[in-house]
Amino acid sequence: MPVSPNEFRSALSRFASGITVVTTKDNLGKFYGITVSAFCSVSLEPPLVLICIEKLTGSHSALLESSRFTVNILAAGDEGLSEHFASILDEKFEGVSYEVDDHGIPFLPSSMARLECSIFRTLDGGDHSVFLGLVEDVSVRDAETDPLLYFQGAYREIAK
Ligand SMILES: Cc1cc2nc3c(=O)[nH]c(=O)nc-3n(C[C@H](O)[C@H](O)[C@H](O)COP(=O)(O)O)c2cc1C
């Protein structure tokens, strides 16, 4: 019997993750940002990560046009940023504190770590696409910063 969407979601909600905002720009130079939990490390040599992006999102078409994206890993307390970039808004960067890197890609300076990637490969993944990113630069905040976590449909923080 095939797995139902509810069974699938229920099992996957038991996998705790961090939260990222993936930022990019389309070929007209418009900025995009999307909240993404489907992010993971793939390879050390070469340094590769992957993100899974739903095909119906605005960011998906921007990523198909773009040659780069940045993964901004959110810190504890950044639920508001996560919800903002998970919303349907025409101008995602209005009212958000951001900077632009040397490649013209926006990033969130408040994030606890940042990985600047060129798109290495794009793979079909059902209703999502898998974008493999070659990590070309990283920036990290001090080790004391706690991450924003997501588990069973809710934001969490590391218990001390
Ligand atoms: C906690 C959380 C995690 C999410 N993870 C993903 C993800 O991994 N991939 C994805 O395509 N959408 C994910 N989403 C949904 C997108 O953020 C949402 O569809 C967003 O509105 C897309 O924006 P856009 O159309 O401007 O690109 C997530 C949303 C939330 C709240």
Image (cartoon, rainbow, N blue to C red):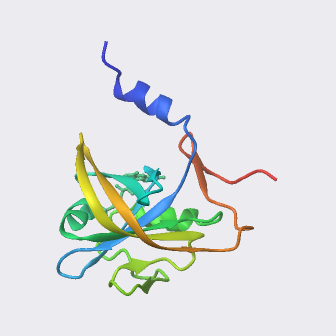
For the point 48% across and 34% down, which residue is it? Answer: 12
Rendered position, 89 above or below 158: below
Spot occupied by residue 147 in the image (x, y as percentages of width and height): 64, 60
In this view, the residue farthest toward the right is 160
Looking at the rendering, the quadrant in which ligand 1 lies is bottom left
State the image quarter where residue 23 is shown.
bottom left
Residue furthest toward the front? 45
Residue at point 25%, 79% (across, down): 30
Of 153 and 46, nearer the camera is 46
* 60 sits left or right of 40 in the view: left
**Left or right: where does residue 105 sit relative to residue 39?**
left
Closer to us: 11 or 40: 40
- State the image coordinates of residue 126 (x, y, percent, origin top left): 24, 39
**Residue at 18% across, 77% down:** 27
Q: Is residue 12 above or below residue 81?
A: above
Furthest toward the top, the residue is 1
Residue 140 quadrant: bottom right
Relative side of 70 to 72, left or right: left
How many numbered circles are shown?
Answer: 0
